[in-house]
Amino acid sequence: MLGSGRSGTFLLARMLDSHPAIAVPFESHLYNRILPLMEGRTAELGPGPARERLVREILRTSDLRH
C-alpha cells in the first residue's frame, strides 16, 4: 500500500492490521524515497529494464528486507 502523506494510508493500514490474518508493518516512507526515481519516467515503467531497476531499488530498502 503506497500513499502520500496525510492521505489516510496510515489509518487504512492500522484498520487492516487489526485483522488476525493480515499483517501490515509501520510506515516505511518508501514513497518519499522512490517517487524521485519515478519523476518523469512513468512512460518507461512498462515491462523492461526501467521497471526492473525500480523494483530492484525498492527491494533494496531496509524496510522491505526486514
Image (cartoon, grey):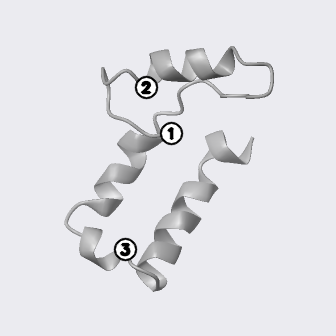
Bin the neighbour count of mark 3 within 10 Å (Cα to Cα): few under 14, some 14-19, many 20 and up. Answer: some
Mark 1 → mark 3, Cα distance in angstroms: 18 Å
Q: Is residue 23 left or right of residue 29?
A: right
Q: Which residue is mark 2?
A: 9
Mark 2 → mark 1, Cα distance in angstroms: 7 Å
Marks 1 and 3, the one that precedes in the sequence: 1
Q: Which residue is mark 3?
A: 45
The structure residue drawn at horizontal position 33% and vertical position 51%, both measured from the top left corner, is 35
Mark 3 → mark 2, Cα distance in angstroms: 24 Å
Where is residue 14? Give x, y as percent: 58, 16
Circle 1: element type: loop
Q: Is residue 4 left or right of residue 63?
A: left
Q: Which residue is mark 1?
A: 1
Number of numbered tags placed on the structure image:
3
Where is residue 33? Give x, y as percent: 40, 46
The structure residue drawn at horizontal position 61% and vertical position 22%, both measured from the top left corner, is 16
Q: 8 or 27, which is in the foreground?
A: 8
